[in-house]
Image: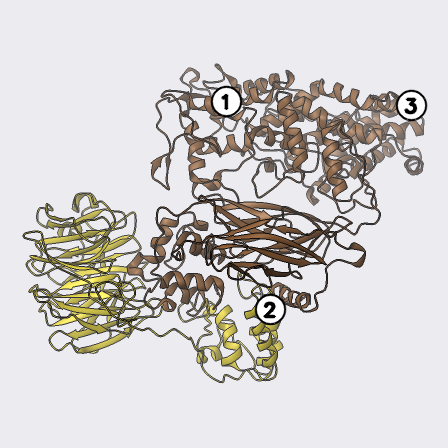
Chain colours: A brown, B yellow
Amino acid sequence: MRRISAVFSAVISAFLISVFSVPVFAADAEPNRSLVIVPTSLELTHPERPHSILVGARTKAGYDVDLTDTAGFSCSDEKVAKVDAQGWVRPVANGSAFIIVRAGGSEAKLAVTVKMADKAPGVSFRQDVMPVLSKGGCNAGACHGYSLGKNGFKLSLRGADPEKDYLALADEFSERRINRHNPSASLLLLKGMGDIPHEGGVRLDHGSAMHQTVLRWIAEGAKDDPASLPALVSVAIEPKIVTTSPGTRQQFQITARYSDGSIRDVSRTGITTVNTERVARADEFGLVTATDFGETAIIARYENIFAVANLLVLPPDKGFVPATVSKENPVDEHVSAKLNELRLKPSVTTDDETFLRRVSVDLTGLQPSPDKVLSFVGDTGVDKRARVVEGLLKSGEFVDWWSLKWGDLLQNSRNVSSDPAVFAFREWIRAAVSRNMPLDKFAREILSARGSYLDNPAAAFFSVSKDTDDTLQRVTQVFCGVRMLCARCHPHPFENWTQADYYGVHSFFNQVASKPDPRLAGVANAKTVLLNKSAVFSVNPRTAKPQAPKYLGGTEPKLEAGADRREEYARWLTTAENPHFARSLVNRVWSYFFHRGIIDPVDDLRSTSPPINAALLEALTKDFVVHKFDMQHLMRTIVNSSTYQRSSVPNETNAHDDMNFSRSIPRRLPAEALLDSLVQATAVKENFAGVPAGFNAAQLPDGNVQSSFLSLFGKAQRMEACECERDLSTNMLQALHFINGQSILNRVVNPTGRPALLLKDKLSEEQLVEQLYLWSLARRPRASEREVAAKFLTSYGEKKAEAAQDLMWGLLNSRDFTMLQ
Amino acid sequence: MRGFASIFVLVFAFHAAAEEVSFQRDVWPVFKRHCIGCHCEKKAKGNLRMDDVSALLKGGKMGALFKPGHPDDSLLISQISGEKPEMPENEPPLSGAKVKLLRDWVSQGAKIDGPPQFELPKLVIPAVYETAPAVASVSISPDGRFGAAACRSEVVLFTVDHDESPRRLPTDFDLVTHVEFSPDGTRLAVAGGSPQRFGGLMIFNITSGQKESERRVGSETFFKGNFSPDGKSLALGGGNGAIYIFPLDSDAPPKLIDLHSDWVTAVVYTRDGKQLVSGSRDKTTKVSSVDGLSLLRSIDESADFINAVAADSLNAISGGNSKVLAGFDLNLALGGVEVSGSGNGARPVNNRSQYLRAFESQSDAVMSLATSGDGKLLAVATRGAEVRVYQTDTRAKKVSLTKVPTPVFAVSLNKDGSRLVLGSKSGVVQVWDTTSSTLIKSLKPVPVFGDGFQGTR
């Protein structure tokens, strides 16, 4: 069975199910009596547009079962509508009737109303033919949707431009691609069905519904649509959430809603895909088979609109007892609720030392020193974790660390700005972080800054951009977590952004120009940010017309002539109602404390990449807005949660979970944190060229630093406004550098290095081991480790210095140093 | 069970076939579906063709495709098997059943029991049409008495001054792209073909209505073309980027000038018959030498496809989707260019701005151009609701016909330019008197149901 292709195995299993009527649930998981019918009522207005019915039930154990295949359907009045064995309802004549559904010993009814127009509508190019081109893949980027087309035939990418596509299909070059008088001899069909050689392969099967649609459209004269054709308004997918187990199948229903209010079932012409392919797979008609434990979004696309459902694939229920959901912290409230749903038990709370190291590195980029570890461990107060968090938030290292992060995101760099401008902007950011400037104010001040560093250091943000396109992409990516680049040339392939959205934002920022600063003649890269208030709006190349400023995914505001349009954008961006700003920042900040964002990646937010825990993101966003965009409050909420403080050791239920925060997933320390922690551990500084003496790694002004250590561990170079610039992966070169390179070896053998310093203190062997563990790993050795270390030191005999050096070298080479456990 | 019925048939077909595999019945459909998109005559990737028996036996660059009786030593099988099969490229692997079928076929000796067959639907020219066919090309005889219109697969000859019923000349082309009266008015050239299958040319005698000759060349339709001024040759734009020059008084094969990188959408002779002006989907307008069969100069690169070209006594003219109509002074453009011999030996003297002769701006994409027989007038059809006539010497607009059925796909002028015929996508053909801007005749060349034609389907 494994070797047979997906289609064939789907055929065979569909065959088995229907012939033998094998229920998909086990005997101990009988469904409840009540059936869940989708939709709850039906209105059919078009003779050629049937609508499907989904039949489901929920087992007592909480699994959803798709009964559509085994259900029986009948119609109370076959003169009004007919229903087939698969649950598709077709209109017959105007009137009302009921569809009766029988499944699992239960019965349900839904009303069906047929309201068809007197005159049968023909096949519509936009509503019927274009979806076939999309489903067939004809207009995909690798095929005729390519910017130059293929083999002389070009379609707009994913059907973005129906007017042009109509001409290409039904008009261009003397109508060569269709033959209205011999429809089946049309080039379009001969190629698409492979009857004459087609490099793109067979896209339509003879006799298929897609073939029939195109054939009928051509036979009806290949007409263009009237201007009055209702427009597609929205797309929906049902069911929205499905809880199931591996091996079961679920049919999804995709419906399209038009501007005249009509609803059409497009399950067969829509495109269904699965985000996490490990968990499930989808066939071409929206039938999804769960394959492995986990969770995935099911994405439905119809024309250029997406809808998302969620599929949970759970292990069998083995007496799972849901945890009590505490409402004390919004993080724990929503994570626990989700874990209960997934039947996952969270890992236990981690020990004090692990917690302290984790929270110190996450908040300040530095592991705690031995005295801090010992005093924390010795503290018996119940609120000691919260107290240590407060201390970290107030520390100077906190300012270093978060200024570094913002410097990365805002791309402050001497590659593009002058030395004084970079240091001035750095100071500006440091002041903002240290005063805990609300992030809305922070964004507004940056986005409306102008002049040179002499006037306003934040203006350096704009002098980084090559042009307005660059500014637009940085502004949307940093402050909204949205990537707009695709929409510059065509509608975004995975989001509903169009060129109107792109150029709408473009027009907000096209008044900005970055020019050499005449006051700073002779200073390399000295720039000043100027505003041309009379700049005309940017031209949308699709319509060849100016596009008025348009909020990202929103409306076009009325702006006074001569206004600084950026200010209006910044005002809109930071309003409490803005759907992007707070949400993207919360998600981004979250990702700095866990192995992933609630939506991941954090700077590619789109409806097709849904949050792993929507309620969590919503609650934190709301809380962030209520607390006036207070970043420290958000961080406090996160690190004080039990969720943050969990152990990385899995229990019997959560070993497979790497998405829902049921345990801590080990993360490598970022480059600067690793180096600064190494310096602290060994007491041997790292000297950087081109910056003031004494700067540590977290204080560096930009990525323009010669340090093989930092580049090997993925320090951000600030060339792009993307989190992906910082590389947190682990690789062999890093391991070899730790083992063979000078960074560690030179430090531990240094005559003023930590081992030498400790030896001077004439410590007992046991104290020496403890100190080396504390400095290297910010924890005390465990009993077994003490024993091994003692043996290790003894084996060196009189070579005490060498023994201490080698022990420290070994500790720094362990995963306990490079990773946050 | 959701619409899988047709695949079911396949499943069982394969089962039945496992006994004795037939090439024609079982193997060819698999090749046709998965292989020949690339391994066909036109593409022959890896020098391999799988749509022809002798080519199939010969194999490709990597050697023989199969060793009869030995599937494990056969390239055909190894290419489609394994964890990640090499073929089909960029497509999902073949199903297990199909791989087994091909294995069985090779095991059984790889017998070819019949040639590959493409089942293509038969073309039927309706006696009466459901919708009027678009008129792709029109021509008016030099004396202005006859008109011809290309209506999909047939050509209709009609008289301008009488209401005789038009004469329908059927072809076996899917699409007639070009019709033209010879300069002496005795013959009618009909060119076109079937897209991605063949190019075709037919010559009809006007007086007898008989087909004088018929040829099929290449694998793509021809586009627009032009009789040489002496009427002895016909030049046609080809789908492979070449101009085809057909001798009309012998059966000799056409001569080719291979000069464009995409379809040659239109080609015309200069008035002395020595040069050809061609426009292409590659957006360029080029001039080539008829005697030398070689490119003389690319005289223009437009922002979009060129749809039509023309030539008066001094200039080459071209227009297309960029909505620009431009003339180019040929003497200046070709100054310094070697006119005879093989190839372009000398550097052109003048740049584009020196030889460009711009016309007024056009409201929409230029679809068709025509000069009068004497070269004094130029007719221009655009997608907009207007056909314009210009004087070629001054490039001044002489006539504007605004009540025309849009979009006009084709125009033609008679010898002195007094009569203009146009053909529209709507299927309507009109003849205009350009001296008085009056409509002489309007017709739908073929009968259409419910459109004046009373009859039963």
* Residue depth check, mark 3 versus mark 1: number of the one nearer the observer: 1
Label 3 to label 1: alpha-carbon separation: 63 Å
What residue is shown with label 1?
A: A571
Mark 3 and mark 1 on one chain:
yes
Residue placed most toward the observer, A671 or A706: A671
Answer few, some or many: residues within 10 Å of disc 1's Cα (few below 14, many 20 plus, some between 14 and 19): some
Name which residue type carries label 1.
Arg
The residue labelled by disc 3 is A762
Amino acid under disc 3: Lys
Question: Label 3, label 2: how many angstroms apart (C-alpha)?
Answer: 75 Å
Residue at 61% across, 41% down: A610
On the question of residue B334 being in view, the answer is no
Q: Have a look at marks 2 and 1 and say if they share a chain.
A: no
Residue type at mark 2: give it.
Ser
Give neighbour class at mark 2: few <14, some 14-19, many 20+ (Cα, 10 Å): some
In front of the other: A26 or A157: A26
Chain identity of mark 2: B
Q: Nearer the viewer, residue A414 or B243?
A: B243
Question: Against B53, is A326 above or below?
Answer: above
Q: What residue sits right under mark 2 in the picture?
A: B95
Mark 2 and mark 1: span between their CA atoms?
58 Å
Q: Earlier in the sequence, mark 3 or mark 1?
A: 1
